[in-house]
Structures are given as C-alpha cells and as structure tokens.
Image (cartoon, helix red, strand yellow):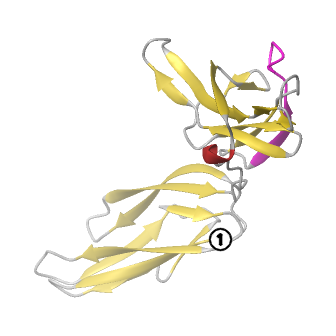
Amino acid sequence: EMKMAGESATFEATIVNESGASENWTLSGLPRWLTASATSGTLKATLSKTITFTVAESLATGKYEQNIYLTGNNNICEPLTLNLKVKSKTPDWAVNPKDYENSMNIIGRVELNNLPMDDEDDIIAAFIGEECRGVAHPAYKDRYDGNFITMDIYGNNSKDNSDAGKEITFRAFDASTGALYPVVTPEKTIK
C-alpha cells in the first residue's frame, strides 16, 4: 500500500470461515495509526467478511511494516503483514532538453548527513540560478557496486545566451523523510 502524507488511505482484507461451524474472531496488534471497520465478531460457516482498514492522515512520511493478527476459536494467531509507504509531495523539478544546445553527463554518489542516497524515489537536481538543468534518481550500478546518480545537465553556449562559467548548484529530496535539501555541495565545483 502507498499513501501521500497528510491524506488518509483505506484498504480492505477479507476473512473467510472455511470450517463447518461458526467462528468467533478478533483482530489484535493494530498500531495507533490504523483503524479497522471491525475488530471482532462471529462468522458463520463458509461465509466471509471484508474489513476496511483506514490509515491516519497524520502518519509521517516513511516506510512501515506492521503485523496484525487474526485469532479464531482455536486461539491460533494468523499474521497479516502490512507494508505501507507514506510519500511526501515531490518537488516539481524538471528540464526540457530541447530548450538547450548542449549537455554534459555526470555520475556520482550523493550523501546526505553522511548517509548515501540510495532510495530510487530520492531526487537530485542541478540548477543554474533558479533554472532546473538536470534531474536524476539514485540507481544501483553493478560496475561500481553501489548506488549512484547519472545525470545529464543542459546548457547553452551561444553568444547572447551563454552559460559558460556559471556555477551549477544542486538540490536534493529525500523521499524517506520528505526532507528537501536546498543546498548540496559537491566535492568539486562543476561548471
């Protein structure tokens, strides 16, 4: 399941009584951020019940794995593992390569707070002034045995519209926390 931060989300699960007798059931292990349309009941033989789960709007950006348990007459807890990704609104960084005469390609490893950016939903962008000139996501590279970004950065060299000598700056978005880093400093200046 996936949801956007600040919005609620719902999903369904169906329980089935495959026995020949009525079954009393209960759900347990629900975290505070998850509610269920029912947490207990009786299910007649061969019938099913669909339960709607609602994820709280307030759940912070991140990845969550949670086990909840269904217990029947036999007192055996059957686990249901929930995997949930809460995403933040991503920056609208984009570049149209057709607007530029030239491009250059860079490859690099990006670290934020001494931790590598390795989530494919993370974003790194290149800018000249306030104009986005390149966008990339980390990806695993066999050749380097790690997560790197490969980015095309676009620019112009014409006399009346030259980017020659202008500094390229970088910004990053950490998808796991929703944090925006307005300044990412490369080890070497890129022009």
Where residue 187 sits, quadrant-wise, is top right
Q: Nearer the viewer, residue 68 or 165?
A: 165
Tell me where residue 97 sits by quadrant.
top right
What is the span of residues highlighted in magenta in the rendered image?
179-191
- Measured as percent of width and height from the top left, residue 53 is found at 49, 74
Residue sitting farthest toward the left: 20
Q: Residue at x 73, y 34 (%)?
A: 155
Q: Is residue 128 shown left or right of residue 134?
A: right
At 58% from the left edge and 48% from the top edge, which residue is drawn?
Answer: 63
Above-or-below relation of 6 to 146: below
- The percent coordinates of residue 31 (x first, y second) are 59, 61
Residue at image mark 1: 56
Helix, strand or loop at mark 1: loop
Is 184 magenta? The answer is: yes
Q: Is residue 58 magenta?
A: no
Callout 1: 10 Å neighbours few (<14), some, many (20+)? Answer: some
Outermost residue, front side: 159
Report whether 168 appears left or right of 109: right
Q: Amino acid at mark 1?
A: Ala
The vertical placement of 38 against 87, above or below, is: below
Residue depicted at x 73% and y 39%: 133
In the foreground, 31 or 59: 59
